[in-house]
Amino acid sequence: MDELKIHELSLQFPHDKEMLIRFLNRNGLVFEEDIEAAYGIFTPEDELAGCGCCAGNLLKCFAVDESLRGQNALGSLISRLTENRFAAGYYDLFVITRPENRVLFTSCGFYPLAETQSVLMLENKKNGLDSYYKKFEADGARLKSGAMNDGVGCIVMNCNPFTKGHQELITYAASKCSLLHIFVVEENRSMFPFADRFRLVREGTDHIPNVLVHPSGPYMISNATFPTYFLKKGEDAARIQSELDITLFASRIAPLLHITKRFAGEEPFDPVTRSYNEAMVRLLPQYGISFIRIARFTTGGPQDEIISASRVRKLLMEEGVTEKLLSFVPPCTAEYLKKNQALWKKTAEQEAIRGGDGHEAI
């Protein structure tokens, strides 16, 4: 083939989408519904011979026929996808693939970030992670007073929304550290927007002098964005995602910020989060990081209940902003919920139509 014929597939048209799905299936891969754009390489006979896709800042669903090997087909696909993502406002791009594909992607200008036995994560910037998290080290230096005898801790939280349970966990963790970094999950796949969740965490921790609150950035992977198109039947996607996320945190992020402790609440309800916590128990000590798991906090009193964000969302959808609901949240969240009562009523009606009750990544 003298010149690769590449053009964008129109996923709104059933023909293009079905063609892509069939091609991926022939190559042992699965189409993922969150795909925003896809490009195909075509033979002179207009047969699909290669493809690559993207969703947000992630490039994925790559497959190339043997007939195209040696013609820089992957590089051509990545070039088109990169142009597409830049035009959409995504400049930090990532690939999650099998470790045996390392050379294919490094030869196309991607740099390894973290690797486990099952998967490899790469990005398009050589020092992207270091640049992102190094700025938080300077913030921490301004808070340091004397020796850091109690070490540096970390919590990664979704706070959908921010509850008394989150506040109590942060208060406890801060008492066990000289400095505590809070990373609020930046991905907007929750009922409450990131900007609101981030603001409430900051307002609810302003009184704790050794706490810093940051956006999580693109280097903390949620189970909602982890690609599964290349996984084989029987592979545990949640476990593989957890191991990659924890390995990336422990091997790259924690050393930059001198983090030696990571805190989390117990998870009695959600099996995915519980599995993630168990993975932290296994993996963090290998990098010299202690994992401290805290029992869930309760409301107390005769109607004693475990405090959870999912319970708050359920009450909000079913009953609105009531005294019972407000017993689960601190003043900053209570004020926020009361100010937006009309919005929650509308959201509840929409959720009832969809049959859902929101999404919580962590």
Image (spheres, rainbow, N blue to C red):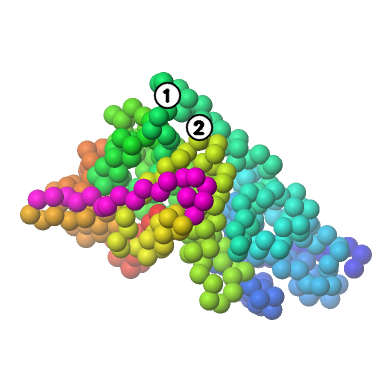
Q: Residues within 10 Å of mark 1 (few under 14, many from 20)?
A: few
- Specify the quadrant that holds the C terminus: bottom left
Which region is colored magenta? 283-301
Of badges 2 and 1, the one in the foreground is: 1
Residue displayed at 54% across by 31% down: 135
Residue 298 colored in magenta in the image? yes
Q: Secondary structure at mark 1?
A: loop
Residue 28 as seen in the image, left or right of residue 142: right
Which three-letter amino acid code belongs to the residue tagged 2? Phe
Residue identifier under label 1: 147
**Residue 291: x percent and y percent?**
40, 48
Residue identifier under label 2: 136
- Could you tell which of marks 2 and 1 lies nearer the N-terminus? 2
Which three-letter amino acid code belongs to the residue tagged 1? Ala
Residue 208 lies, with reference to residue 304, above or below; the image says above
Residue found at the far left of this picture: 302
Q: CA distance from mark 2 to mark 1?
A: 19 Å
Q: Is residue 310 visible?
A: yes
Residue 47 colored in magenta in the image? no
**Residue 66: x percent and y percent?**
81, 73
